[in-house]
Amino acid sequence: MDQTLSKYIKFFTCFLILASTITFAQAQINPTEIVQKANDQLRGLSSTATMSMKIVRPDWSRTITMKTWASGEDYSLMLITAPARDKGMSILKREKEIWNWQPTIEKVVKLPPSMMMQSMMGSDFTNDDMVRQSSIVADYEHTLLGEEEVEGMTCHVIEFDPKPDAPVVWGKMKMWIEKENYLQLKTEFYDEDDYLVNSMYGKDVKEMGGRILTSTLELVPAEEEGHKTVVTYEDIEFDVDLQEKFFTVQNMKRVR
Amino acid sequence: MWRSSIILVITFLLATASPSFAQKEKKEKNWFITGYIKNLQSLTFFDNPNLISPLNDNLLHQRLNYSHFIGEHWQIKAGLRTRLFLGEGVKLNPNYGSDIGAVGNDIIELSAVWLDKPGVVGHSIIDRAFVEYSKGDYQVRVGRQRINWGISSIWNPNDLFNAFSFTDFDYEERPGSDAVLIRKYNGYASSVELAFKLSADPEKSVAGLLWKFNKGSYDIQLLGAYHKQDLVLGGGWAGNIGNGSFKGETSYFISLTEDRDNALALTLGYEYQFENSLFLSAGYLYNGAGQKSGNILELFNFELSARNLYPYQHSLVVGSSFPLSPLINGGVSIIYSPNENHPLFFTPNLGLSMAENWDLSLVGQLVFAQAQKFTSPLQAIFLRVKYSF
């Protein structure tokens, strides 16, 4: 089995999680409620997107671009548009089943569920940064530290301390949530010894698909000079008419 | 000669419609050209004093894929494969050109050897050329196409329209068949397919019906076919045990000629990917038409078909791949056939992403057998540079 495919699946997983963390606008003051709003998920909603992921290292970088179609967390379809070698390859996910279409050999390959469970090695995003986003409301105590400006926008600064026995990996997190639209402009992840491990930046705030959102997400490891992973949405639409019956092997072969 | 000229003209037309030119267009395009250029350098070592060793050969290989969408329902696709062979192995075989030219899965001849000199051979083939019409749940395809009925990972006894050489890792697209395919989708992973490749030669004709459906997270397929003077009943599945995938495929070939017996082909496989991206697979092939005790070198010259996918009766395979760094992947596959010769086929590989769209791979093919005290009578090493566009 091709490790390239495995890389795309990681990217796919990453997208599914990112899509579910795009925020809604609503006014709140209580820090837990701010976090709740900032983390309000798009579960059950549908979206289509064109996006890229660029892995940057001191002496090289690689970019993957793709189109995605998703309906909630259970149904999604992704089409690789670059690199050229794998253009036209697609991946379909329906609940726990995953298929891969390989146009060069005209073959539909059923993939093992274990492929969706691998960590995001090869990019700086890890399952811990991403998958656990959903636990940031339930597993942490939230303290409002005050206000700060990030890129000219006023943000609530909130500290996250894990609740006793919460199954989390971070010792602490700090999040800068922009006041008007509840955008996560910056998040710092600390280990148990209070050392900064990763910073995630939400950038290029713009209106896309009728929502104000951060169209670029950058993850920067603290200890590795010149390393980062950048996810950019070129285009995204929400609430599109995508029903369960769109997510078929037939469409996996047909989308372009 | 006229054929060579046609091929050359088509090559020229496709080549001038270069992708860099194409990308300048801003409006929604309805046609695309993709492809690659790759260079495969090989060294073949023989443990035989009568043979020159190693043999140094070079294969320059270009592929152009053309696709054109016409309106909502029509699509045209074509693929052109051009290769230039050069080297000592090519020079050793005076029939190299005609041998390369004779290899084909086709009824209509769409290939040409346009250069045939001692040590240098040039060959082009249009290995895809079809028209597709699709509307609603229906899809009809006519022309040279790859019909892939395989569902399992390594061996595919259900892949009746094509079989490819196990050792030819450099032709992932595999040959096309001059065929008609009619497919109706009737569920998210279900379809009924009728396909036929007809020829005056019954040894070349294939016609079959395939039914695919999904039940309890298993993709299941059943087929009945006429395949090169055999009647075939077969089926396969792809599902999960735990979080790994469990696949299998089987075909029973009922011979319609006196020359050969009925034969069963059956394969099983399991694959798992660990959280750290380590990928492991294991599989088994029973080949009823295979030899009970074959020589190891059978691997390079046995007659391959869906009813004979590997030379020996029983074969076990284990494989693994792992990303050594974000840019480097390593992998290995080992096939062992438990018979008195104990043939072992070992293929390590290493892949490196050199730059965006540039890939380098190093592939080894090593065979071992007890007769040679498990030293290797034949080894080949391939270094491939590939640029994709």
Image: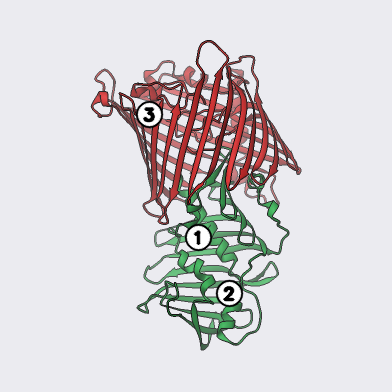
Nearer mark to the viewer, of 2 and 1: 2
Task: Tell me where residue B284 sits by quadrant.
Answer: top left
Q: Would you say B285 lies left or right of A150 here?
A: left
- Name the chain letter of the residue that bears numbered label 3: B
Q: Amino acid at mark 2?
A: Asn
Q: Are marks 3 and 1 on the same chain?
A: no
Find residue B238 and report its horizontal and vertical position in percent. 54, 42
Q: Amino acid at mark 3?
A: Asp
Find residue B251 and report its horizontal and vertical position in percent. 54, 28
Q: CA distance from mark 3 to mark 2?
A: 59 Å
Mark count: 3
**SS for tag 3?**
strand
Quickly name the residue at label 1. Answer: A54
- Name the chain letter of the residue that bears numbered label 1: A
**SS for tag 1?**
strand
Find residue B344 and report its horizontal and vertical position in percent. 33, 31
Q: CA distance from mark 3 to mark 1?
A: 38 Å
Quickly name the residue at label 2. Answer: A39
Between residues A76 and A225, which one lies in front from this camera angle? Answer: A76
Q: Is residue B199 above or below residue B11?
A: above
How busy is the neighbourhood of tag 3: few (under 14 within 10 Å), some, or many (20 plus)?
Answer: some
Task: Tell me where residue A237 sits by quadrant.
Answer: bottom right
Who's the residue at 26% across and 21% down the image? B48
User: What's the colour of chain A in the image?
Assistant: green
Q: Which chain is red?
A: B
Q: Would you say B303 lies left or right of B160 here?
A: left
- Name the chain letter of the residue that bears numbered label 2: A
Task: Classify the position of the N terminus of chain B by image quarter.
Answer: top right
Quickly name the residue at label 3. Answer: B57
